[in-house]
Amino acid sequence: MIKLNYTELRHTPSLSPLQHKIHEIIFEADTFWGKVFDVVLLICIFLSVTVTACDSVESLHSEYGYYFNIAEWTFTILFTIEYFFRLYCVAKPWLYGISFFGIIDLMAILPSYLSLFIDGPELQFLSVIRILRFFRVFRLFKLVHFTNEVELMLDSLKRSIKRIAIFTFYVFIIVFCLGAVMYIIEGPENGFTSIPVSVYWAVVTLTTVGYGDISPKTPLGRTFSFFIMLLGYGIIAIPTGIVTSEMMLPKKTITTRTCSFCCREGHDPDAKFCKYCGKPLD
């Protein structure tokens, strides 16, 4: 349980009524104006991504490039104003700046400004990263259970990372050995010119990708590759089983309530304090 420090709470910057109101509109999805704001934001995101995609088509760019440029900068200015409002209505702006959505919001406007100083129209096309902001649709339509599933998957991956890392290390050793054996069987005359090339072939075969740029020619090599392909299915299934076992743990219920101090959401329905920073929830 998080213990609150009275001195820390007393010295935490308090939000003004205007900041509270803006925070409620921008960050909360359960109020009327919050929903209106999110709907308008999602429409602008969709239109801006569409404009960027259409501008990459040469025939459309040559005819409507001027209008695309105006539309792109209009959306960039709107998203910039929105970004600064998000920083304004939280107690610690830097916490929002380094959060997932804070980084995405910054990357959504940064390419357009960088294109003013760095030559090359391709840089401005990086603004298509704005489509990542569509993750907010889960909050808008109260699809909190989907957000919960995403967090569950990420937590499961985090808990499984050590076992997956050890498993990957053993797979690397196995692949190296298989590549070396295939190099001995086939040799340079059949396309396996070195052990690294043979290891590359083993990785492609083990993962069942099968590019076909290198293939065994001898009967023994083909027989050996047959067993490698079968082994690949089993190796691919093991990490899935590791993560799945972690995902079978009990689930928790979360809401879209956002802490105005640390800008993190995912609190329990009856929570009165933020479970990440311990500050009171609005």
Image (cartoon, rainbow, N blue to C red):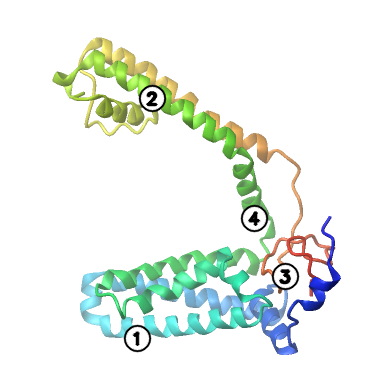
Local SS, label 2? helix
C-alpha distance separating marks 3 and 2: 48 Å
Question: Which quadrant of the view contains residue 37?
Answer: bottom right
Residue shown at 30% from the left, 79% from the top? 117
Dot 1 or dot 4, earlier in sequence: 1
Instruction: Give percent across and percent down for residue 272.
Output: 84, 67
Residue sitting at the far front: 7
- Amino acid bearing label 2: Val
Neighbour tally class for label 3: few under 14, some 14-19, many 20 plus, Cα within 10 Å: many
- Amino acid bearing label 1: Ile
Local SS, label 3? loop
Local SS, label 4? helix
Q: Camera-side residue: 249 or 195?
A: 195
- Amino acid bearing label 4: Phe
Give the residue at mark 4. 146
Give the residue at mark 1. 70
Q: In this view, does 134 lie above or below 167?
A: below
Instruction: Give percent across and percent down for residue 55.
Output: 30, 74
The mark found on residue 259 in the picture is: 3
Question: Which quadrant of the view contains residue 245?
Answer: top right
Residue shown at 16% from the left, 21% from the top? 188
C-alpha distance separating marks 1 and 4: 36 Å
Residue shown at 38% from the left, 22% from the top? 229
C-alpha distance separating marks 2 and 1: 53 Å
